[in-house]
Amino acid sequence: MLVYDGDCGFCRRCVEFGRRHLPLMPRVSAWQELDLADHGLTLDEVTRSVQLLGPHGLRASGARAVAVLLALQPRPWWRAAGLVMMAPPVSWAAEAVYRLIARYRHRLPGGTGACAIG
């Protein structure tokens, strides 16, 4: 399951992009619709970054969650992008870019005041 901020327009646009372009998209849920404790998540985790929860204890957040989601795709270009994103030093840069985007998502296309991280 991919857990995202359902109040954020930018986040919703990213989820819709994934639904349109990724052949294998997990179940997607806004954190506002979940009992976080039932999924082992905290409010701090879900307000800070996207969360990917999967079988056998799979858990990833932020850029790593995006990379894992891409690496699991059947199409080779998505899979390659995900694998590259998981390998240092690209993974370090991907996480830095993710944090930058998360910090300023309210200023990006589709973003609103609800997207701002406190």
Image: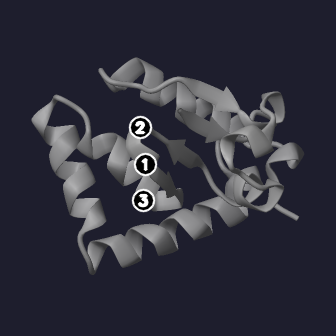
Q: Is residue 102 left or right of residue 63?
A: right
Disc 3 crowd rating (10 Å Cα; few below 14, some 14-19, many 20+) is: many
Q: What is the x, y in percent for residue 70?
A: 31, 42
Q: Earlier in the sequence, mark 3 or mark 2?
A: 2
Indicate the amino acid at tag 2.
Answer: Pro
Q: Secondary structure at mark 2?
A: helix
Q: Is residue 82 left or right of residue 39?
A: left
Q: Which mark is residue 64?
A: 3
Indicate the amino acid at tag 3.
Answer: Arg
Q: Is residue 2 left or right of residue 70?
A: right
Mark in the foreground, 3 or 2 = 2
Disc 1 crowd rating (10 Å Cα; few below 14, some 14-19, many 20+) is: few
Q: Earlier in the sequence, mark 1 or mark 3?
A: 1
Q: Secondary structure at mark 1?
A: loop
Number of callouts: 3
Mark in the foreground, 1 or 3 = 1
At x 46% / y 59%, what residue is drawn? 63
Gap in angstroms between the C-alphas marked 2 and 1:
6 Å
Indicate the amino acid at tag 1.
Answer: Leu
Against 109, residue 75 (above or below) is above
Which residue is the site of mark 2?
A: 55
- Residue 65, visible in the rendered structure: yes
Disc 2 crowd rating (10 Å Cα; few below 14, some 14-19, many 20+) is: few
